[in-house]
Amino acid sequence: MRRLSFGAAVIAAVMGLPMVASSASAQCTASGAPASCGLPGSVSMTAGRVVRLQMSAGSTALAAPSPADFDAGFNATTGPTLTVSANAAWTLHLHAAAAMWTATNTSPGAPARANKPAADLKWSTASNGSFAALTTTDVNLVTGSATASNATTLYFQTRYNWTLDTPGIYSMAIVLTLTSP
């Protein structure tokens, strides 16, 4: 008995629905052979900002310094290629995650330099361009407009000092942030 009353309620609700809907919808009538009837319609969507950052490598092994590098005060390493895809204007920012490098001792009696500053790593978007010292504050690495693919290679110069940079393994986290205002 419940089944019948439930079914009757559903049928009544369904039968009442087309009457309400038909008064608010367009109509189309065709007769004869061949018959055709068309109604205009529309669709809509909202596309939000979409940005993507791809890196050719998640880490970069900096070139180990030679005596000539210590004499020159630095050496150079090519970093990752960063590719941005975006459907709006964008900016890629860069900063060091900490003020100092992480230092691990490798030689007894010669501890690794625990206070090597992040600024001892310089960066540029051109291998022969001007290099800026890395800081813990975001700086604009590169900006652009909507693009399917904008590739930028990051270049590094690591500073060395004969009396300060003792043997050790040094590492530092770098943060890349892609924004679309």
Image (tube, rainbow, N blue to C red):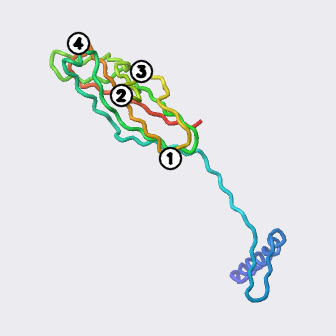
Looking at the picture, how far across and down is residue 138, in whole percent? Answer: 49, 26
Which residue is the site of mark 4?
162
Q: Amino acid at mark 3?
A: Ala
**Mark 4 or mark 1, earlier in chain:** 1
Eye-nearest disc, 4 or 1:
1
Which residue is the site of mark 3?
132
Between residues 144 and 109, which one lies in front from this camera angle?
144
Q: Spatial distance from mark 2 to mark 3, Cα to Cα?
A: 12 Å
Q: Amino acid at mark 1?
A: Ala
Where 149 falls versus 101 (above or below)?
below
Mark 3: give few (<14), some (14-19) or many (20+) Cα within 10 Å: some
Screen quadrant of the C terminus: top right
**Mark 4 or mark 3, earlier in chain:** 3
Question: Which residue is at 19% across, 21% downward?
Answer: 66
Q: Spatial distance from mark 4 to mark 1, Cα to Cα?
A: 46 Å
Screen quadrant of the N terminus: bottom right
Which residue is the site of mark 2?
127
Where 39 falls versus 130 (above or below)?
below
Eye-nearest disc, 2 or 3:
2
Looking at the picture, how far across and down is residue 81, in whole percent? Answer: 38, 38
Which residue is the site of mark 1?
148
Eye-nearest disc, 4 or 3:
3
Q: Spatial distance from mark 4 to mark 3, Cα to Cα?
A: 22 Å
Q: Amino acid at mark 2?
A: Ser
Q: Amino acid at mark 4?
A: Trp
